[in-house]
Image (spheres, rainbow, N blue to C red):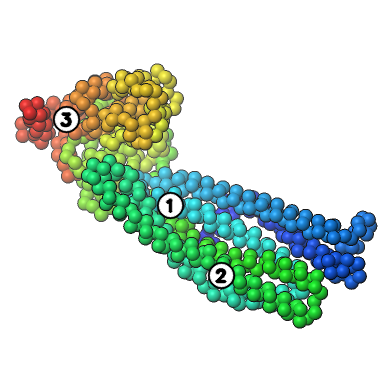
Amino acid sequence: MTRRSSIVAIFREFMTSYPRHFVVLFLILVVEGIVAAAAVLAMVPLADFLLDPTLAAPSRLTQVLLGVMGPLNIHPSFWFFGLLFVLSNLIMGLLSVVARYFILHIKYAVVRGLYGGALTTFLKARWEFFSGTDQGRLLNTLNKELQNIGDTLGHMATQLARVVQLCIYFSVPLWLNATMTLTALGIALLLGLPFFLLQKVGYRLGQQNTETANVMMGAITEILSAARLILGFGRQAQSRKRFLQVFDQHVHVTLRSQTLETGVGLLYQPIGILSAIVALGVALHLGSPIAEMAALLWSLLRALPILGQLMSSSVSINTFLPSYEQLVSLREQAKSLEEVEGDRLFTRLKSGLELKNVTFIYPGRQKTLQDVNLTIRKGKMTALVGESGSGKSTITDLVLGLQIPKQGEVLLDGIPFSEWKQNSFRERVGYVPQEPLLFHTSIRDNLLWSYPEGSEDDLWKACRMANAETFVKELPQGIDTIVGDRGARLSGGQRQRIALARALLLKPELLILDEATSALDSESERLIQESIDALAKNTTVLIIAHRLSTIAKADYVYVLREGHVIEEGSYVDLRQKTIGIFSQMIQVQQNIVIEEVLT
């Protein structure tokens, strides 16, 4: 995307999305321009009166005004002309404030629309978009670059206002003295030509500014998300040093970018003054009336700085364009990974789910799953076991539709997953991931997040089934206790039990437990396991287990290794195989437990 195409694209997007805002703004700017012209012209009769109170030889404009004042019985005086000049400038100032309000209103309306549109596009994408996109780039786009886009729009709207003002400010001098005005304008444009060449420099600095901001955002996000690990290893100094290095790189670019933006306007001011002085000398040489020269000088001194501001804004827009281009790039990436939605509405599970000849490969890696066949039957507990990296979590992603197999298909009640409205299915799934994430709100709100219609009795029943009731009641504010960011104020086991209660509150058609009891003590695990066993009588359960004792009641077990199903069958049958992989895994875990007891 070139600079010119970016400008056209951003302007088209804003104009088509917010036409009413721009029409109102344009009308206000036109009125403001008319009042600005009146404010300039109001200086002429005031200057005439100051030079000759008798107004024996007034200028053309003063003659017109006197012709209007006569029938209204208004007598010429310093106070009348002075009040007229002040009043016109006051109205112009008020209209400028209104115009600035609308510019800001448009800016934030567009930023809101960009946030909403970006999140809508991103959240329509498959999990692959989030897992495969650099988090620093994604977070920086949403946190900082969207604000830059809003600033760009503000500059564009401000430029529109300044163009209208320039037309008015130059139309008055052109009418009063075309020679003087064209002389000033010609000098200003000729001397300002080098400033237009700085736009390419601004665009290049904008690209570097966006890229270094991506790195900086990624670094601070990494520090905050890994704070426990950093403190545990005592690596605070190294983490701080690394962040400050990328921060300094960003500041190095930002300083040049912002200096260029402000420097153009400041350096152009003396050029504008020079142009006005030269034009005034031409007017004196031509013998122009002093009153008209005063109005001309006033108008030019107001107009020429605006021309400098236009140049400064032009550089600023080119600096911010990379922010818009990065947003467009991410939106296109998300759209290319958009979930394929079907028309079927899921209400309840009838027969179950099936992975049929499924092969899945993560980009840049070897096959994670290869020719996998498995069935999750309705009303049954299905377990997946295997070493880390064997493909268990990937199967969970495929069951939820978060990933799409490269070969084979996932069937929901015998129908390809792509034919279903996927959220209608996910809304009926209770999912407890290995790393439970709680929101920075109360336990009550965390539970109701999965099922807003849940009653008080439903909440406590879910807590009871998850073995969370006792500790929740013992908290200072009970179920209304704030859990902290990601549940940081609770222990790992407590977080996991709240996450389980959140899934159970939904009364799901399918309950997925991804190592859901791994952080619990033996007694809590036993109690939760009893609840899961009871729930499994009426609910379909898919459980990924590290502790094989948690799947003793499983109806069917799949053992995975390096992306293949190497064993399958009931828990009892697999355990009884003397040379089976599963029976060996059970024996190893039992030996570990015995050693822990003995020591």
Where does the image place residue 124, in percent across and percent down from the top left? Answer: 42, 44
Marks 1 and 3, Cα distance to the nearest angstrom?
44 Å
Name the side, left or right, on which 407 lies relative to 250.
Answer: left
**What residue lies at 32% left-to-right and 48% top-to-bottom?**
222
Q: Which residue is mark 3?
A: 548
Q: Which residue is mark 2?
A: 267
Where does the image place residue 134, in percent across and percent down from the top left? Answer: 34, 52
**What residue lies at 70% left-to-right and 69% top-to-bottom?**
300
Task: From the image, state whether disc 1 or disc 2 is nearer to you.
Answer: 2
Task: From the image, state whether disc 1 or disc 3 is nearer to you.
Answer: 1
Q: Which residue is mark 1?
A: 141
Marks 1 and 2, Cα distance to the nearest angstrom?
32 Å
Amino acid carrying mark 1 in the image: Thr
Name the side, left or right, on which 37 lies relative to 265.
Answer: right
SS for callout 1 = helix
- Considering only order in the chain, which callout, 3 or 1, is on the residue closer to the N terminus? 1
Q: Are marks 1 and 2 in contact (CB under 8 Å)?
A: no
598, 84: nearer the viewer: 84
SS for callout 3 = helix
SS for callout 2 = helix
Q: Is residue 20 above or below residue 477?
A: below
Q: Is residue 571 above or below residue 392?
A: above
61, 12: nearer the viewer: 61
**Quadrant housing residue 26:** bottom right
- Considering only order in the chain, which callout, 2 or 3, is on the residue closer to the N terminus? 2
Q: Which mark is residue 156?
A: none
Mark 1 surroundings: few (<14), some (14-19) or many (≥20) residues within 10 A = many
- Considering only order in the chain, which callout, 2 or 1, is on the residue closer to the N terminus? 1
Name the side, left or right, on which 351 lies relative to 342.
Answer: left
Task: From the image, state whether disc 3 or disc 2 is nearer to you.
Answer: 2
Q: Are marks 3 and 2 in contact (CB under 8 Å)?
A: no
